[in-house]
Image (cartoon, rainbow, N blue to C red):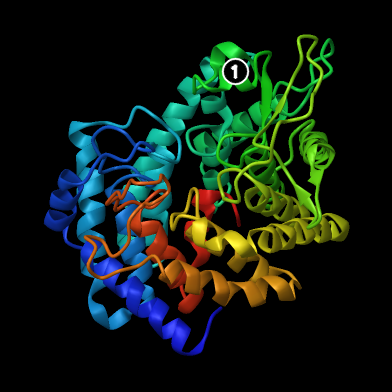
Amino acid sequence: MITGPLAEQARRTARLITSRLADPAHVRASVSASIEDPNTPGPRQASSLLAGDAGLALLLRMASDADPGAGWHRDAHERLVSAVRSTHDNPMAEYGLVAGTAGLALVLADFASADPRYRHSLGALHTRLGEQLRERGHRRPQPPVSVAAYDTLQGAAGTLGYLVSVPSPDDALRDGIQELVDELVGVCTPAATQTEPRWVIPPEDYPLPREQEEYPHGYINLGLAHGVPGPLAALSLAWRAGYRRPGMREAIANAIDLLSSTAVEDGFGADWPSGVPLDAEGRRTPARHTARTAWCYGAPGIAAALLVAAEALEDDRLRACAVAAFEAALRRSEDRLHTLPPTICHGLAGLLAICRVFACTTDSAYARTALPVLADRLLGWCDEGLAFGVQNREEPGLRIDNPDLLCGAAGVAAALWSVSSPVSPRWQRSLLIA
């Protein structure tokens, strides 16, 4: 945690951002006046955790703990009601974290943990999620499995990460948990006739056209947002919560081995590419370059997933590897912190959130030293003259007024509250970093 004048500045800035986001009319007008964020194209979905009003409700509830006298709890409740009511006209077809039932359930669970009056609505949402997972189980994705089927944002990994945090799940949710564990075990386990597990992404499933040139014969995605670190973190969280399924321990080991074997050493320590290309015979080949320094891709997100696994397995050696990798990422980025955008997904807020985990749960003195440095740099992006107090600035020349958790102002405020005030870290489960 940060202290002194810097902590007060962080709280003051988080308060400013939160107050702007608490006004629904201001949010609508500012989003309408801004250019569209290419990360989240199309209309905002009120029910979305990571790109809609549900995420703002989660931030406002966090703010109500950090700043009890400000009345944020009323704003939080109103924003949550708006998010839930929106599903009456636009039922959630997806089950995942970013814009599905699991994401909204995570928000409701946070409210219900402090106020039992939300438990009935949470139960109804859990019933719907159980139905979605049962329907999904009847048509479980077959190899090759798409990224969206297993990743953190839309797929099995993020959903499992939430579900294993549910205390005393009913039979339907427990069945869903077991189904998701089995699916992710399958993703991380090779078939009898294969050398690679089913985590290989074939060209026909590439979400971005540019990947065709970089990976003409398929690849293994190494990002926490969309790749193997997501299943690793989710399976590890399930293991830590007491779930055991056939092949589960071996699948976790396979994912750890993949990340260990694909690390690229430089003068700072371990780093990773965004993906591992395969050749025409399906063999791994060297990547052209390493990934960005972020939650979604790169060493920080991978180190966080390795730390989750280390905690689950009570593996001191793996914990030391995770700490070393994160400290290397911090050292590597020292001279270019000013180039990192402010957001959770691609930038400083995500790095700050991960740094908080390492600072609070490991013996990394370097992470504790870096925490105020990262917070100060993040505050440098904030300006009360902006619509939400901070913009998404990841693309040169683009200044986007994005209010949301993953790529916008809410994520910046959440990161600032979390390092400057005694708030619940429960929101970090949406990122699979704790």
Report if residue 20 is visible in the image.
yes
Which residue is at the front of the view, 306 or 26?
26
Which residue is at the front of the view, 363 or 64?
363
> What residue is shown at x 24% (from left), y 63% (from top)?
386
Task: Give the residue at mark 1.
Answer: 213
Could you tell me which quadrant the N terminus lies in?
A: bottom right
Above or below, comparing residue 159 to residue 353 in the picture: above
Q: Residues within 10 Å of mark 1 (few under 14, many from 20)?
A: few
Above or below, comparing residue 35 to residue 414 in the picture: above
- Find residue 235 and report its image quarter: top right
Above or below, comparing residue 297 to residue 349 in the picture: above
Could you tell me which quadrant the C terminus lies in?
A: bottom right
Above or below, comparing residue 408 to residue 141 in the picture: below
Residue type of the residue flagged with mark 1? Glu
Report if residue 166 is visible in the image.
no
> What residue is shown at x 77% (from left), y 55% (from top)?
310
At which x and y percent is residue 374? 54, 69
SS label for mark 1? helix
At which x and y percent is residue 205? 55, 16
At which x and y percent is residue 398? 33, 46
At which x and y percent is residue 94? 39, 29
Q: How many marks?
A: 1
- Find residue 352 and report its image quarter: bottom right
> What residue is shown at x 16% (from left), y 49% (from top)?
28
- Find residue 43 and report its image quarter: top left
Q: Is residue 19 left or right of residue 412?
A: left
Q: Is residue 15 left or right of residue 263?
A: left
